[in-house]
Image: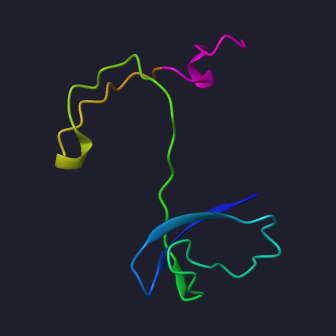
Amino acid sequence: MPIFEYKCQECDTKFDFLHKSVNNIQSVNCPSCNSENAKKLLSTFSSVGESSGDFGGSCSDGSCAIPSAPVGGCASGMCGLN
């Protein structure tokens, strides 16, 4: 069941809508003003979790200090499944 983000073109409210099926996208009404004039937004991927690594900088300003050696994940054998 996909969740899409929308913005109402009438009252500028942003909201999420859970569709029952990707193959049958039903019409969307704004929860604030009940308008059917909503535009689907391009959403970014979000992940919830904790990180034990400190990469020492922000990638948004181009100062990423990500180590060159692989860390974490199953590719490096650290997920416990190997």
Question: Depth check: 58 or 30 in front?
Answer: 30
Judge from the rendering whether residue 3 lies leftward or rightward of residue 19; answer left or right: left
Q: Is residue 18 above or below residue 56?
A: below
Question: Depth check: 8 or 66 in front?
Answer: 8
Q: Is residue 49 above or below residue 5?
A: above
Position of the N terminus, as image quadrant, is bottom right
Q: Quadrant of residue 3?
A: bottom right
Q: Residue at x 72, y 14 (%)?
A: 81
Judge from the rendering whether residue 46 lies leftward or rightward of residue 25; answer left or right: left
Q: Taken as a whole, is the magenta stretch helix, strand or loop?
A: loop
Q: Quadrant of residue 13?
A: bottom left
Would residue 74 be counted in the magenta stretch? yes
Judge from the rendering whether residue 52 lies leftward or rightward of residue 46; answer left or right: left
Q: Is residue 6 above or below residue 47?
A: below
- Residue placed furthest toward the front: 33
Residue 43 point in image, percent of width and height? 49, 63
Per the rendered image, the range of residues in magenta is 72-82
Would residue 27 be counted in the magenta stretch? no
Question: Depth check: 49 or 26 in front?
Answer: 26
Q: Residue at x 63, y 22 (%)?
A: 74
The colour style of the image is rainbow
Residue 15 point in image, percent of width and height? 51, 66
Position of the C terminus, as image quadrant, is top right
Residue 39 point in image, percent of width and height? 52, 82
Q: Residue at x 51, y 34 (%)?
A: 48
Residue 78 point in image, percent of width and height? 58, 13
Question: Depth check: 17 or 33 in front?
Answer: 33
